Amino acid sequence: MNTSSNTYTVVYASVMVVIVAFLLAFTSTVLKPKSDKNEEIDKKKQILASLNIRDIQNENIEAKYAEVVLSDMIIDTLGNVKAEKGGFDVKKKDINPENLPVYMCKVDGVDKIVVPVVGKGLWGGIWGYVAVDTDKMGTVYGAYFSHESETAGLGAIIAEYEGFQKQFAGKTIYNESGDAIALSVLKAGKKVDGVGVNNRCDAITGATLTSNGVNDMLHDSLKKYMKFLKNNAK
């Protein structure tokens, strides 16, 4: 074949496209199990972080998770258990009022309930996990948050323990009458009806929209779990 002809060029280009496509597909197939495993471990690490278990090596995450997370159920907004297991496999995008993952845990012999929260920040998705004591007021035991693309040094601070997450421990989810979600992220001095001192967490200076996003995320997500949390309060 004449290597300078148009036919040769077209055939050569077509063969190269097929080869590259095959190699990409092959690489993706080979690497997918490892990628999936890394995502699984990272998710377990995030759940453990909400339970204030943070200083743990990756190789110990699965054992620790199995120790403290007793079950991963799926519930609905009425508090009904839809499935006794499988909550861990629910993706963030698939969480809805009829498909709510919830994690029943025990830390140092004390029951905790971990629920995922999902929302929108300034530039993209934000998410996290809130660990709750099984008391009447829904006291927060710990919280973990992360983000897709918030601004470094501003909105991205939601992913920092000392800078943002630490303040949630000890706050309460409900208002004084216990009939509404009141856990909030607010600017200093801002007053909101039904939000008391024990419900307030400080917004991030210079990251108003991200802070508002976390606030909305908490209210929108936690109210879906309110029936279940109330039913399991001791």
Image (tube, rainbow, N blue to C red):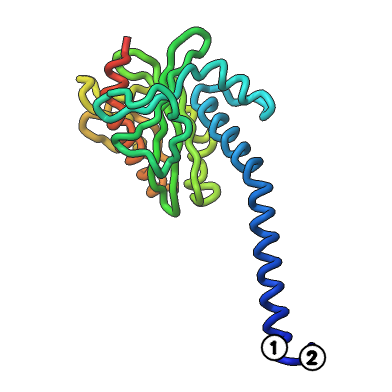
Q: Quadrant of the C terminus?
A: top left
Residue 222's x, y, as percent?
32, 31
Residue 220's x, y, as percent?
30, 37
Q: Which residue occupies 68% across, 54% down?
A: 26
Residue 164's x, y, as percent?
48, 34
Give the labeled residue for mark 2.
2
Give the labeled residue for mark 1.
7
Mark 1 falls on what kind of element? helix
Q: Which residue occupies 39% across, 47% down?
A: 120
* Left or right relative to 194: residue 72: right
Name the one closer to the observer, 175 or 96.
96
Q: Residues within 10 Å of mark 2 (few under 14, many from 20)?
A: few
Mark 2 falls on what kind of element? loop
From where the camera sits, is residue 169 visible? no
Q: Is residue 27 above or below residue 8?
A: above
Amino acid type assigned to the residue bearing label 1 in the image: Thr
Q: CA distance from mark 2 to mark 1?
A: 8 Å
From where the camera sits, is residue 136 visible? yes
Q: Which residue occupies 60% across, 33% down?
A: 41
Residue 171's x, y, as percent?
38, 23
Q: Residues within 10 Å of mark 1 (few under 14, many from 20)?
A: few
Q: Looking at the image, how many numbered discs can be counted on the residues?
A: 2
* Left or right relative to 56: residue 133: left
Q: Which residue occupies 37% across, 44% down?
A: 213
Q: Are marks 2 and 1 in contact (CB under 8 Å)?
A: yes
Give the mark nearer the N terminus: 2 vs 1: 2
Residue 131's image quarter?
Answer: top left
Amino acid type assigned to the residue bearing label 2 in the image: Asn
Q: Which mark is residue 94?
A: none
Residue 211's image quarter?
Answer: top left
